[in-house]
Image: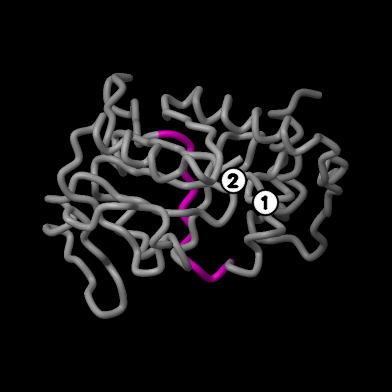
């Protein structure tokens, strides 16, 4: 029996002859025997994440903590950034020059039009998944409001190696306590091929993603 017939049989079992829900519904066991924890060493997990997120056309930089500021400055220069929005809780050590920084915090929420005129956004993250090359934001701490990571054309995201998990279930366990927050899952720059199978970038978020991993 093929998969299609199995699905149709399950539907038939759940309805009586008159087309209404049957009194006794069949239940089916779904196997949960996938790996929930990883035995990979941290350096291998970090390397895998860098490779996977890079496959999505994101630029990846693996740096030491002392190299972070200079790397951010280099990225800003490459993209010719004139203005950058940062969450109010961003560490001061992450960025060295104040002249083009616009803060979005509890005292001042930037509007959509204001954000649309800003070149870049700098945030941290909640977790990252090596298996899928995915970054997860929950709008707390160094990540700011969800909207600031969606409108500027360039997103610079800082990921600490301790925030990188090898498998999806490991990361889900970590973010489960934030289940009521507006979670954002980022796997590379925004892109879609919905219309005529032509790739269009920047429709649902930033066209450019720079990921800086603190190793």
Q: Mark 2: few, some, or many residues within 10 Å (few <14, many ≥20)?
A: many
Instruction: Identify the element where label 1 is drawn.
Output: helix
182 inside magenta stretch: yes
Query: What residue is at 45 percent from the left and 43 percent from the top?
Result: 68
Labelled disc at residue 12: none
Looking at the picture, how far across and down is residue 32, in whole percent?
84, 46
29 part of magenta stretch: no
Give me the C-alpha separation between circle 2 and circle 1. Answer: 7 Å
| Residue at point 17%, 55% (across, down) | 99
Asked if 79 appears above or below 155 in the picture, the reply is: above
Q: Are marks 2 and 1 in contact (CB under 8 Å)?
A: yes
Is the magenta region chiefly helix, strand or loop? Answer: loop
Q: In the structure shown, which secondary structural element does the residue marked by tag 2 occupy?
A: strand
The residue beneath circle 2 is 128
Residue 133 x/y as whole percent: 57, 34
Q: Name the spot of residue 88 as percent of width and height, x first.
A: 34, 69
Residue 100 position in % (x across, y down): 18, 53
Which span is picked out in magenta? Answer: 179-188
On the image, which quarter does residue 128 sit in? top right
Residue occupying image coordinates x 76% and y 23%: 2
State whether residue 40 is above or below residue 113.
Answer: above
Residue 171, numbered circle: 1
Which residue is at a point 49% across and 26% down the rendered structure image? 54
Who comes first in sequence, dot 2 or dot 1? Answer: 2
Between residue 85 and residue 28, name the one nearer to us.
85
Query: Circle 1: is it few (<14), some (14-19), or many (20+) Cα within 10 Å?
Result: many
Q: Would you say 162 lies left or right of 23 here?
A: left
Name the side, left or right, on which 132 lies relative to 27.
left
């Amino acid at each position: 029996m093929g998969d299609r017939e199995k699905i149709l049989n399950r539907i038939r079992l759940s309805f009586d002859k008159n087309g209404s829900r049957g009194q006794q519904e069949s239940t089916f066991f779904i196997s949960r025997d996938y790996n929930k924890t990883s035995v990979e060493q941290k350096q291998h997990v970090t390397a895998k994440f860098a490779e996977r997120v890079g496959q999505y056309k994101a630029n990846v930089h693996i740096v030491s903590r002392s190299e972070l500021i200079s790397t951010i400055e280099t990225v800003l220069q490459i993209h010719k950034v004139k203005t950058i929005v940062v969450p109010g809780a961003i560490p001061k050590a992450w960025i060295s020059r104040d002249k083009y920084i616009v803060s979005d915090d509890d005292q001042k929420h930037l509007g959509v039009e204001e954000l649309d005129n800003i070149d870049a956004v700098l945030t941290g993250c909640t977790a990252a998944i090596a298996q899928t090359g995915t970054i997860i934001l929950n709008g707390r701490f160094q990540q700011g409001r969800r909207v600031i990571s969606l409108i500027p054309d360039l997103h610079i995201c800082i990921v600490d190696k301790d925030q990188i998990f090898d498998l999806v279930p490991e990361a889900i366990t970590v973010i489960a306590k934030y289940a009521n927050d507006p979670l954002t899952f980022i796997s590379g720059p925004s892109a879609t091929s919905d219309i005529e199978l032509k790739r269009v970038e920047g429709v649902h978020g930033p066209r450019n993603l720079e990921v800086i991993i603190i190793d």
